[in-house]
Image (cartoon, rainbow, N blue to C red):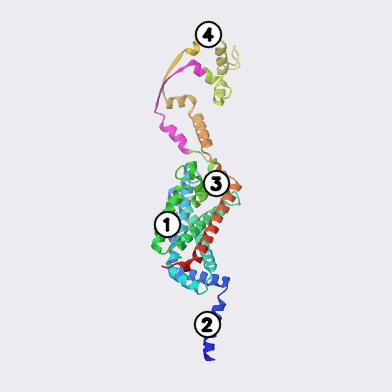
Amino acid sequence: MPEEKRQNPFRRIRMRYRGRFSQIQIYLGKLLRMFLYQSDWKVLPMSAMVAGLVGLVIRKRFFETMEGTLMSALAVTCLCLWNGCFNSIQVICRERDVIKREHRSGMHISSYIAAHMIYQAMLCMLQTGITLYVMRAVGVRYPTEGLVTRFFITEFSISLFLITFAADMMSLWISALSRTTTAAMTIMPVVLIVQLVFSGGMMSLPARAEPVTRVIISNYGLKLIATQANYNAQPLGSAWGTVERMKGNEIKTTLTMGRILDYLGDPENPQAEQIRSVKLTDDSSLLGAITVGTVVDTVNAGEDSEQLRAQTIPIDTTVGEVIGMLGEKEVREYVETKATESAQVSDYDYSKLNVAVYWLSLAFFALVFAGLSTITLEMIDRDRR
């Protein structure tokens, strides 16, 4: 009888914690204690430091021009990836032996991963708040109105959290695959480089790389931030800067009158129509209002038009002089308008549908990687090392 009394309490303890939800609470408590007492909290000041560095770089570029916004979106996406990846890259592989032993004693892998998901989500929320605050403190100015919600800061917070959490769950899976912390930390830089290269923001990718970008977290994160920043509505600042640097370039060529008359006589050319509408005389003159178009049409209809069209006009000038003749303000508006139109990307359209699709894609990534982590750890008993 005394022997049974000594054994019964242990049986009751084992039965008490055999439920999946009970185990989630146990492992979540364990993770919180590790956060406090094993220095896992250090990821938060590291996030603040990196956010400050990124904010100092992008503060005068973000939300200002197309190229500045795209560069800033890539930088913020990489910041979120860095935070998420290093949150969980070692959390499983560093206690692999403990997991194996507890799994054989009745631990539910799904409960263990669920506890990590809750804990990592809390960590990602804290990092998102720190990132937004620090970038604001160093000079990044966010828009006021949002696209999906009333406030931009609200939906921007959701975006940063989802990017960070998706990267976190990807890193959790890598940690589940790795046998040692050394192996995990060796794989991590390769993963980050792949995320950077296939994000679509650092370099243009060939068409054959398109299938790869569909499974890259950074690609969706970049598109999401560029969409919320209203990339397509911003000017392409580098376009006029390029023209400015070309002002001293010489233009030496020879034009025929025929080419000039054909250009001015093209009814489908809007620039030619503007030139044709320029008045050479006003309505009060004896001949009435004469426009450039009137002169061009008269010359084309004249008997000597063929001889006139064959005449050549040597041109020796500079880009700056041509701009001065046409009007610098008008040329700048034209260049910036056309350059902006050519640089617009449909994936960055300022629409609620785009934002919703990218949010759901990132959430899907997080769930898939969490599922893969569970499946991987379910086979931990086969690990013979």
Q: Which residue is mark 1?
A: 188
Queried whether the magenta region covers residue 299, the answer comes back as no
The Cα–Cα distance between marks 3 and 4, rounded to whole angstroms, is 58 Å
Q: Which of the two labelled residues, at mark 4 and mark 1, occupies the earlier sequence position? A: 1
The disc labelled 1 sits on which kind of residue?
A: Met
> In the displayed structure, would residue 324 be above or below residue 10?
above
Q: As drawn, is 317 to the left or to the right of 356?
A: left
Q: Which residue is mark 2?
A: 10
The disc labelled 4 sits on which kind of residue?
A: Asp
The disc labelled 2 sits on which kind of residue?
A: Phe
The Cα–Cα distance between marks 4 and 1, rounded to whole angstroms, is 76 Å
Asked if residue 137 can be seen in this view, the reply is no
Badge 1 element:
helix
The Cα–Cα distance between marks 1 and 3, rounded to whole angstroms, is 28 Å
Asked if residue 329 can be seen in this view, the reply is yes
Q: Residues within 10 Å of mark 4 (few under 14, many from 20)?
A: few
Q: Which residues are magenta?
A: 237-260
> Residue 269 is drawn in which quadrant?
top right
Queried whether the magenta region covers residue 245, the answer comes back as yes
Q: Nearer the viewer, mark 1 or mark 3?
A: 1
Q: Which of the two labelled residues, at mark 3 and mark 4, occupies the earlier sequence position? A: 3
